[in-house]
Amino acid sequence: MGSKFKVTSLKADRKYGIVAGDLENLMDKGCQKLQLSRKGCRVCLFEDGTEVDADYFSCLEDNCKLIILEQGQKWDGEFRYYLNKILHEYDNSNDELITTANRMLSEEIRPRKRKLLQYFVEDSTENITAENREDDQKWFEGLNSRFKTKSDYMRFSCGRRMRNYLTEVKNHADKLEGDMKKNYCVFVKEIERHLRQNKFNGCYFDRRAKDNNRLCTPNGWFTCQGAFDEDRCSFIHSINPYGSRENRIVFSTWNLDHGIEKKRTIIPTIVDTVKPKIDDRMVEHFYSLLFTLANLKLVHIVCHKKTEHKLSCDPPKTCTGKKRKKNNLL
């Protein structure tokens, strides 16, 4: 007998009901109904884009909504489809969308939906896409005139944080004496050389940088990566400092947090490393821990735990701290 399904395609403007007993039968009938060439087609769930194979077919419920994709086509799911449709149709009526979103924000809705609506309203009302000073002068208020673009300043802002970290590391030499102090200074000087070669890793905050070199989306959205001992932010913190002067200032309170702690662990371990003699092989190891995303997480101030992390890195053994992965949003 078979089960009932509702099928559509990227070209169709409606869904068609068919009855099929197996995947091949569904493909034959569906392609015929939708006037598609059978070769290279595949079936996916309309809801979320999950591909349906022969085994999965037997698990489908009656009246399940499916989409048949031709070779090379992709489907991200029903939610994205309707969202794109709304944004496209209301492209010239942005005020109406914002009014509706604000009205919904005044109602009782779940926190996650409220957060998404807030992002939408911010993205629609702020001057996020503007990059040059002359296109968004308010954003640059209080900043040195040498910054001509938002990305230039954000790159500088990240580099300034790295410079502050470097200063903390260098200042520890004041607590040392004799050969220990000399070895420490030489070792840190090599770490500094690596940092300067990489332009103080300012690319992390630069939305123009390559995907694997930045912490934000191409539009400048940053997402909190959660506390050092968590895989993600449970509060869904997110911000776009490129959107407004206010967001730029608030973003300065976000932390680039060391998983393996700088003062409690990394600096003392450097001292122990250079105590007998300088091991040049460890320079890159400590540079990575101090200044790269291997040990840094971007976190909202609420997610910045100031308790002792209790993660160690005793060279030349591999660091026992969990290596951090990048997390880009939205």
Image (cartoon, rainbow, N blue to C red):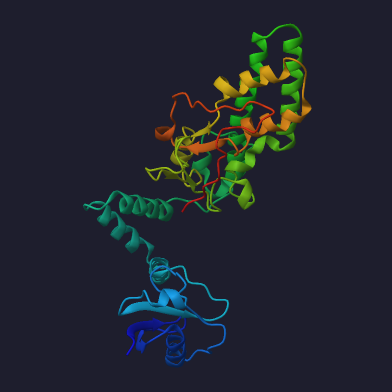
Residue 69 appears in the rendering: yes
Instruction: Establish if 3 lies above or below 178.
Output: below
Is 124 displayed left or right of 320 in the figure?
Answer: left
Task: Return the residue found at the far top.
Answer: 178
Q: x%, y% of residue 318?
A: 65, 33
x, y (%) of residue 259? 53, 32
The correct choice, above or below, for 273 with respect to 282 in the image is above
Q: Can see residue 145?
A: no
Report whether 212 appears left or right of 64: right
Residue at the spot 39% in from the left edge and 33% down from the top edge: 302
Name of the residue lying farthest toward the left = 108
The x, y position of residue 78, in whole percent, is 39, 70
The x and y percentages for residue 274 are 73, 18
Q: Nearer the viewer, residue 316 or 86?
A: 316
Query: How many labels were placed on the picture?
Result: 0
- For the N terminus, the image quarter is bottom left
Residue at 60%, 42% (x, y): give it.
204
Nearer to us in this view, 36 or 159: 36
